[in-house]
Image (tube, grey):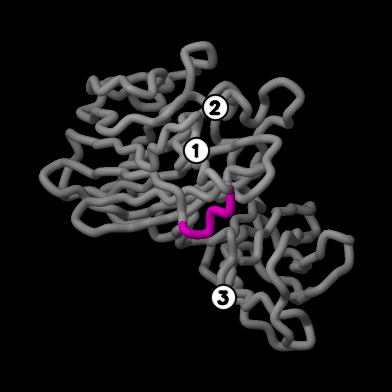
Amino acid sequence: MKTNYKKLFLMLLLTSSIAFSQQNVFIDIGGAGETTASNYNNITSVGDMNPLSLINEAGASTTFSITLTDGFIDVNNNGAGNGTNASATGDAAIFEDQATRDSFFGSSNHGGIDDQLGSFDFTGLDDSKFYSFTIYAARIPGSSDRVAQYEFIGASTLSVTLNASDNSSNVALANNIQPTAGKITLNVTPHSSNTHSSKYFYFGALKMTETDAVLAIREAILEENGLNIYPNPVGDELNIDYILNTDSISSILVYDISGRVVYNVKNAKNKAGVYSYKWNRADNSGVKLASGTYFLKLQTEKGTFSKKLILK
């Protein structure tokens, strides 16, 4: 059966990691009781407007600073890895456990407070370089969808979303943004798909990557035989990216909450490389699936990887 897999040669991945000059900065956003060591930068007050000079993942000083320019309501202490909640996994596992336990939050009505914007300025950036951001937030356990929008404003504007409700593995990705006059602004607000009556939204951890050229592969966090999906929640189409480190047969399956397979596709054995697949949220008979919670599974000869899906 012919498939619509589009192979990107493994050499592209290797070239992008060898030829590019890059550095990473990790930021833990949350309360003072859950700060992260390991060369993290910690922002611990929802109202601290003072610039914070940033170090990179090697502990070296950078030219970068971050300033909270519009505060949040309070600290959420009910994130992944806190108390009885599961530690972050999957794509979110790039963050230290302490960084996933808490976050800042806003709301349209928290104790009578209406604060639906949190904002940061990243300064000291290089206008000739590119900045990519990985964002994590969690509120476990959750009820209604608590979807935040993260809008990055530089030479161009890019918005991404993330549902913090019951999240322990998903991240939001915003790649290849260039600054204006050395600055990128990040605005955090509730997204229009946020169904919580008080529009709670969260921001818990961030990784910023500086490169001197556009990242050739959008999902920079893909690991060996890894899996990444976006956007999630899913609108009309889902992008599925993964790496085969060795030659392997691969299958993609989607399950509903009862465990019934509603969609599956199996690919013949492919060479090692990076693969992208687009799914139009239809079942195998071509009928669009209803809104709700589903689970996606990637099966390869090296292992199985799963993600929770929210179809809007």
> Which residue is at 45% across, 58% downward?
218
Drawn side of residue 74 relative to residue 88, left or right:
left
Q: Which of 107 and 164 is in front in this view?
A: 107
> Which secondary structure, mark 2?
strand
Q: Nearer the viewer, residue 279 or 232?
A: 232
Q: Distance between the residues labelled 3 and 2?
A: 32 Å
Q: How far apart are marks 1 and 3 (CA)?
A: 25 Å
Number of residues whose C-alpha sits closer than 10 Å to that of mark 3, classed few (under 14), some (14–19) or many (20 or more): few
Q: Which amino acid does label 3 sit on?
A: Asp
> Which residue is at 78% across, 83% downward?
284
Please, is residue 79 above or below residue 136 in the view?
above
Query: Circle 3 is placed at which residue position?
Result: 236
As drawn, the label of residue 76 is 2
> Which secondary structure, mark 3?
loop
Q: Nearer the viewer, residue 275 or 295?
A: 295
Q: Which of 34 and 112 is in front in this view?
A: 112
Image coordinates for residue 237, horizontal then vertical, percent? 57, 73
Image coordinates for residue 273, horizontal then vertical, percent? 59, 63
Please, is residue 127 above or below residue 138 in the view?
below
Range covered by the magenta-colored residues: 192-196
Count of numbered tags: 3
Q: Which of marks 1 and 3 is nearer the N terminus?
A: 1
Drawn side of residue 308 relative to residue 147, left or right:
right
Q: Which of marks 3 and 2 is nearer the N terminus?
A: 2
Q: What residue type is labelled 2?
A: Asn
Query: Residues at badges 2 and 1 in contact (C-beta under 8 Å)?
Result: yes
Drawn side of residue 13 relative to residue 91, left or right:
left
